[in-house]
């Protein structure tokens, strides 16, 4: 049985990355700059976080459970000083959930594949009549003869 190693999966990145209560820069992947980020002056392919806007966006997510998206978008625009429409707010949150779900699913698939590979190796080595894997020294001596 040939066992192939599992390659690395490129997981989609969530829109907001926070590590130790500090927002991290993200790569620019689209033409529009998402709410809560600004274009880096030195590197045009990097977006720098605006912590105040991102913290307000976190509060806005909680407000959406109780208030309409129009009211929350108006509140967010008023308190942040940066305009965001109700459609833009909903789109931003929808994309964030979608990316987090994709990352969770891909991670789960990678775990399933790794467990299956380990089980296949175990079954192959325990199977009656299976050959014992050769060590590197035995392989070298067999090729030199």
Image (cartoon, grey):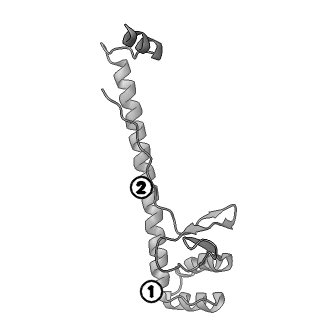
Task: Give the side of residue 110 with respect to residue 64, left or right.
Answer: left
Residue 44 falls in image quadrant: bottom right
Residue 138 falls in image quadrant: top left
Q: Secondary structure at mark 2?
A: helix
As displayed, is residue 139 above or below residue 14? Answer: above
Residue with the mark numbered 2? 105
Quadrant where the image shows the C terminus: top left
Q: Is disc 1 surrounded by few (<14), some (14 to 19) or many (20+) residues within 10 Å?
A: few
Q: Earlier in the sequence, mark 2 or mark 1?
A: 1
Q: Residue shown at 37%/13% (left/top)? A: 143
Q: Where does the image place residue 90, in percent across and percent down from the top left?
A: 46, 81
User: Marks 2 and 1, Cα distance to the nearest angstrom?
Assistant: 27 Å
As displayed, is residue 116 above or below residue 131? Answer: below
As displayed, is residue 29 above or below residue 141? Answer: below
- Of residue 23 and residue 38, the one placed in the foreground of this image is 38
Q: Where does the image place residue 130, in percent across and percent down from the top left?
A: 32, 15
Q: Residue shown at 69%/65% (left/top)? A: 21
Q: Secondary structure at mark 1?
A: helix
Q: Residue shown at 42%/37% (left/top)? A: 115
Task: Give the side of residue 143 with respect to residue 25, left or right.
Answer: left
Residue 87: mark: 1
Quadrant where the image shows the N terminus: top left
Q: Is disc 2 surrounded by few (<14), some (14 to 19) or many (20+) residues within 10 Å?
A: few
């Amino acid at each position: 049985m040939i066992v192939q190693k599992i390659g690395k999966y490129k997981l989609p990145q969530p829109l907001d990355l926070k590590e130790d209560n500090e927002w991290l820069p993200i790569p620019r992947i689209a033409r529009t700059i998402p709410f809560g980020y600004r274009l880096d002056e030195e590197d045009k392919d990097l977006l720098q976080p605006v912590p105040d806007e991102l913290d307000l966006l976190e509060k806005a997510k909680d407000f959406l459970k109780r208030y309409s998206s129009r009211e929350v978008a108006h509140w967010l625009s008023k308190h942040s000083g940066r305009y965001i429409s109700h459609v833009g707010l909903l789109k931003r949150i929808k994309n964030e959930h979608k990316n987090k779900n994709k990352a969770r699913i891909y991670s789960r698939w990678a775990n399933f594949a790794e467990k299956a590979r380990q089980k296949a190796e175990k079954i192959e080595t325990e199977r009656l009549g299976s050959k014992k894997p050769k060590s590197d020294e035995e392989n070298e001596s067999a090729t030199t003869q």
